[in-house]
Image: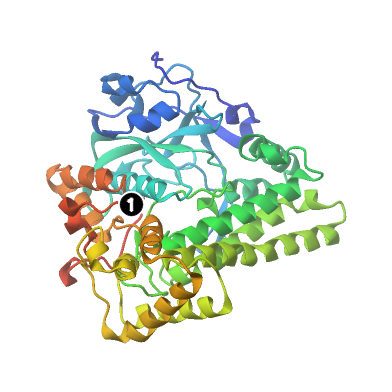
Amino acid sequence: MTDTPIPFDNRYVQLPERFFSHEQPTPVDSPNLIRANPRLAAQLGIDPQWFATKEVVEVFSGNSVPSGAEPISTVYAGHQFGNWNPQLGDGRAILIGEVVDQQGQRYDIQLKGSGQTPFSRMGDGRSPLGPVLREYIVSEAMASFGIPTTRSLVAVTTGEPVIRESVLPGAILTRIARSHIRVGHFQYFSARQDLEAVQLLAEHLIARDFPDIQGAANPYIALLEQSISRQAELIAKWQLIGFIHGVMNTDNMLVNGDTIDYGPCAFMDNFHPETCFSSIDHRKRYAYRNQPAIGQWNLSWLAQALLPWLDSDTDKGVEIARELLGRYVDDYQEAYQSGLHQKFGLNEVSKNTVAFTESFLDMMSRQNADFTLTFRHLSDIAAGTGSSQHPVYYQLPDHFTPLLNQWRELRKQQGTSDEEIQRQIYAVNPAFIPRNHLVEEAINEAQRTGDLRLFHRLVDVLENPFSYDPENSDMTQPPEPHQVVRQTFCGT
């Protein structure tokens, strides 16, 4: 054990041992720090100055278990691309403990790529460098976008090779999560008819992530209701930023409504509803267009697990579940339409404005318009290029002219000044996203030569994605034809 300033306060490990397996990270040969996140550490109550010590690398590589840690890997099940797998679990991750931040929010500290566990399913329990860099970049960007997400605290190299399609450098990511409890956790115990475990898990989760519903007449109904609402809002935010998760299995869906598991994830360049990047999603089950419906499908399995507690009468419980799942559509549409109208600088949702936004998105798809730059360009149009925060770097083709005239008329009707509309559009439409070609270039440079400069630059720029900096104008540009990324990979 190593004395550290990490103020552990572990609760999941207090559940019965059938919920997890006690594990120790597998030591690595020669770890080195890639990047740490002292600002996040301070939020978690960890002295950020400690991150300047060599001890940090030892702890977050798994070579030294910190005092107060109680390392475990949790067990869960899940539907993977629609196919039922009765036992999954943390196959390459070890949760070393929990902390409570300055606002009283509990967080898990988990090492990803820290070695084999009983749930590795014949895997090596390790992670190549690429997936660690991708998750660090994208998860921190999502946090900057204001999208609920797990976070990245530390990334280290292991000094050991990882064998996938080729020999790659290994790495470990320290992931921070408000909770790692997935729909698949509930499915695992529900499928085994372990009703006591389902109830204990629900009670644990409510106390941890949904304390406001502890006094509800039926806290299990309230849990399902809030999870549905949070997931609807989360996926609406994904759609509005052009984010495609890529592997929306029930074991990759947190009940508390945060984004997790940045495997083959990617952001759209040109807008098209059928966009899909994941190399393992052969039927495009998780394409951009399908994400909202898949969210509801996944939640139906949470509802099934909680069914015995929704009502003592099974038929009534089913009615309650169906009614709550039906609200998902309304919750999603409300969040999506409100956010989409904000992207256009429109303050009110009406039949006319919805018809306009649908027509505009359809035109974007037909013209292969860049999703991110189109909306940033609207801010330039709103107040004229003379008032722009930066030179116009993206032009829409003439096919958009009738729609732009319609947009101007809708803006005029709401009575908001052009300058205010421009500010509104800037505030919700990022100038910078983790462009796939840049993420891939950063990964390739790091894997080939150990050059991490582009990785660090991406993380730095994406800390302020809504503020345009002309020195980083190259990071706003869509890929050249030879740079287009057509597939992304998990790395497992």
- Single out the residue that lies furthest toward the left: 449
Left or right side of 466 for 104: right
The residue tagged 1 is: 491
Left or right side of 425 for 99: right
**Position of 187 relative to 408 (above/below):** above
**Position of 1 relative to 58 (above/below):** above
User: Dividing the picture into quarters, in which one does residue 110 lie?
Assistant: top left
Which residue type carries mark 1? Gly
The x, y position of residue 167, in whole percent, is: 21, 48
In terms of depth relative to the viewer, which is nearer, 460 or 177?
460
| Residue at position x 51%, y 61% in the image | 236
| Residue at position x 27%, y 44% in the image | 459
Q: Is residue 242 shown to the viewer in this render?
A: no
User: Dividing the picture into quarters, in which one does residue 398 lie?
Assistant: bottom left
**Position of 93 relative to 273 (above/below):** above
The x, y position of residue 350, in whole percent, is: 57, 75
In terms of depth relative to the viewer, which is nearer, 82 or 69?
69
- At mark 1, the secondary structure is loop
User: Dividing the picture into quarters, in which one does residue 384 lie?
Assistant: bottom left
Q: Is residue 208 shown to the viewer in this render?
A: yes
| Residue at position x 35%, y 73% in the image | 271
The x, y position of residue 465, in whole percent, is: 32, 51
